[in-house]
Image (cartoon, grey):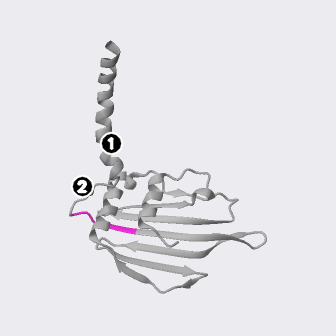
């Protein structure tokens, strides 16, 4: 008789944990409550597809394609592409204020501005890779991080960096 009561008592915290976790699993969005009306944000995401070109004794990294995505606080987006050192026409659009608010909330909630790293370089042996740079200015504070794609570096790239990159998204 003691064992069923003990099981029921042990099941209560599990049931409560399930009730708390269920909304987070069903709706895993960042809460907008992290933002306020005074928040000002500017995001610049740069992506360079680089290739190492050898000149005999020296090597040089040359950009095959470069993409720059700039998002302003008002939701204005500029997308610039350069392929083989030739700039393509600039594309502009406006995203809804809710999307800017979502990006702001994600930056604030995840602690992106407090990441202690600034650069994750590519390994010297990699001949071709993609390099990213993300510059976020939030309420006058700026954080810029540069990193190479995961298969081009032996250094761990924190998921928050790739999460912000995928939310702002360039090209491909």
User: Any mark on residue 21, and which?
Assistant: 1
SS state under label 2: helix
**Up-down: is 43 above or below 151?**
below
- Give the mark toward the camera: 1 or 2: 1
SS state under label 1: helix
What is the residue that sits farthest to the right in this orientation?
56
What is the residue that sits farthest to the left in this orientation?
37
Q: Categorize mark 1 by other alpha carbons within 10 Å: few (<14), some (14-19), many (20+).
A: few
- Which of the 4 image quarters holds residue 134? bottom left
Residue drawn at (33%, 74%), measured in percent from left and top?
A: 95
Residue drawn at (31%, 64%), measured in percent from left and top?
A: 140
Residue drawn at (48%, 58%), measured in percent from left and top?
A: 162
Magenta residue check for 94? no
**Up-down: is 125 above or below 86?**
above
Q: Categorize mark 2 by other alpha carbons within 10 Å: few (<14), some (14-19), many (20+).
A: few
User: Any mark on residue 163, and which?
Assistant: none
Circle nearer the N terminus (1, 2): 1
Which residue occupies the foreground of this view, 25 or 64?
Answer: 25
Q: For this view, does 113 lie left or right of residue 68?
A: left
Q: For this view, does 164 lie left or right of residue 152?
A: left
**Up-down: is 152 above or below 80?**
above
Q: How many marks?
A: 2
- Which of the 4 image quarters holds residue 36? bottom left
For the record, the magenta segment spans 38-43
**Residue 4 locus on image (x, y percent):** 33, 18
Residue drawn at (51%, 79%), measured in percent from left and top?
A: 81
Q: Could you tell me which quadrant the N terminus lies in?
A: top left
**Residue 16 locus on image (x, y percent):** 28, 35
User: Any mark on residue 33, and which?
Assistant: 2
What is the residue that sits farthest to the top in this orientation?
1
């Amino acid at each position: 008789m003691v064992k069923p009561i003990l099981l029921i008592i042990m099941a209560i915290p599990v049931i409560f944990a399930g009730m708390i976790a269920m909304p987070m699993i069903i709706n895993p969005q960042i809460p907008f409550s992290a933002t306020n009306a005074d928040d000002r944000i500017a995001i610049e995401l740069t992506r360079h597809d680089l290739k190492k070109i050898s000149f005999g004794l020296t090597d040089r990294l040359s950009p095959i394609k470069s993409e720059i995505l700039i998002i302003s606080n008002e939701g204005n987006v500029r997308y610039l592409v350069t392929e083989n050192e030739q700039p393509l026409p600039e594309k502009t659009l406006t995203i809804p204020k809710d999307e800017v608010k979502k990006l702001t909330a994600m930056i604030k909630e995840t602690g992106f501005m407090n990441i202690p790293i600034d650069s994750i370089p590519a390994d010297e042996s990699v001949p071709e890779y993609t390099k990213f740079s993300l510059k976020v200015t939030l309420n006058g504070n700026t954080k810029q991080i540069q990193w190479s794609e995961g298969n081009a570096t032996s250094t761990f790239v924190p998921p928050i960096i790739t999460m912000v990159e995928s939310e702002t998204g360039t090209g491909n």
